[in-house]
Amino acid sequence: MGNIPQEHKFPPLFSKEHQLMTHESPVRIEKNKKQLSIGVAKETIMQENRVALVPNSVKHLVLQGHRVFITAGAGEKSNFSDLNYSDAGAEIVAENKEVYKADIIIKTAPPTIEEIDFFTRDQLLISPIQITMVTKAYLEKLKQKRVIAIAMEYMQSEDYSFPVVQIMSEIAGVVAILTAAEYLSNSPESRKVLLGGISGVPPAKVVILGAGIVAEHATKTALALGASVRIFDDDINRIMKLQTRIGQQLHTSTINPVYLEYQLLSADVLIASIHSPSGRSPMIVTEEMVCKMKPGAVIIDVSIDQGGCIETSRLTTHDKPVFTKHGVVHYCVPNIPSKVSRTASIAISNILTPIIIKAGTMNSYELLLFQNAGLRNGVYTYKGSITNKYLAESFGMKHTDLDLLLTYGM
């Protein structure tokens, strides 16, 4: 640094001259925090094993002055006991209908139309939406209760990513490979082979359809276990980004049916992770291709929640996760993260807790939404109005722009 002119030099920190100078003094500004009640219900549908808030998050919210109500047994499938929640400061209630009296309702499965009957007016609901299950009567109930409903899978971050979808996709990618390794070696129809190679024995071959987040984490896991990986996607930019994130050159290809069939002939595992931005997943692998795969090979169709992109796929459950067709083991469970429900619950809770805390610092939900474009992107009903254009048009209902409603409300 250059010399500072004498007239611009600062007096020594503890000199008398410094002590006589006027200094800025920080003033603590207390924000008006609103005490909120948060309800966490026990999930009863769709084999949902996750819970929306974990005990550590509950403790954080309670220390912020909020009250958390949770149905007895809500966390058991994620290995969180009622005692864990009670120690964290939650108030345990016997039935779900008691939880639905809270200001904010958060769920890892959408509420049923019967559950909405227990809601009160002007509540905030954060849950998945499951568009394929939504009916006009369902939306009318939410309108009637004037619920502010936010679909957690459509909430965006400042970088326009979808944090809940992203973190669940990361889990699905890892679990898909671990599940494939399990059935490749341990099911009655399996090939009885190890996913990764050992000295003198070549590794299993994994074919992955898609180059998104699921594929990225499936690839990382498969490579870490020593498997040989082939990746197919029609978007060259996605393939390039995937290779950059993995940090090495990968065996990749566009989705060419002839070359894909050639690779499937010797594949031990097929992971299907191609999703459509709207509607059904494209059908990529035909039944004829499946017939030519090795006996005991394993298919994990992560795209099954959109119908699947394997012609032989059909919906399975966590209770009965696999079936065998043409000698190939199929795993087609739509809610893969629920298989590791404790990890998935912590991930969801980490995303939702800061949002709830921020809601407590606002005077109204309107202000919360007004200042957070990412949350607005997930809103589909707002105080008696349908704000999601796609849903409104699907059922011939009136659509109202959320920005106009918020501006008018402010």
Image (spheres, rainbow, N blue to C red):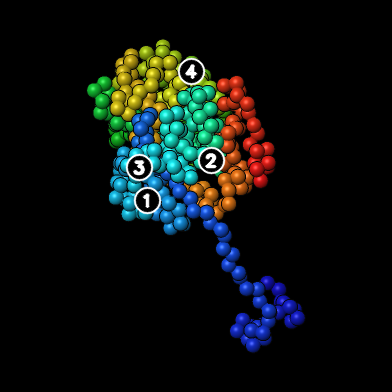
Alpha carbons under labels 2 and 4: distance apart = 42 Å
Q: 365 or 262: nearer the eye? A: 365
286 w.r.t. 391: above or below: above
Alpha carbons under labels 1 and 2: distance apart = 23 Å
Eye-nearest disc, 2 or 3: 2
Pick whichever of labels 2 and 3 is earlier in the sequence: 3
Q: Amino acid at mark 4?
A: Met
Q: 193 or 159: nearer the eye? A: 159
Q: What residue sits right under mark 3 in the picture?
A: 71
Pick whichever of labels 4 and 3 is earlier in the sequence: 3
Circle 3 — which element? strand
Circle 4 — which element? loop
Alpha carbons under labels 4 and 3: distance apart = 41 Å
The x and y percentages for residue 11 are: 67, 82
Circle 2 — which element? loop
Q: Which mark is residue 283?
A: 4
Q: Which mark is residue 122?
A: 2
Alpha carbons under labels 2 and 3: distance apart = 21 Å
Pick whichever of labels 1 and 3 is earlier in the sequence: 3
Q: Are marks 2 and 3 in contact (CB under 8 Å)?
A: no
Q: What residue sits right under mark 1 in the picture?
A: 90
Q: Horizontal placement of 255 versus 401: left or right?
A: left
Q: Amino acid at mark 2?
A: Asp
Within-10-Å neighbours for mark 3: few <14, some 14–19, many 20+: many
Q: 198 or 332: nearer the eye? A: 332
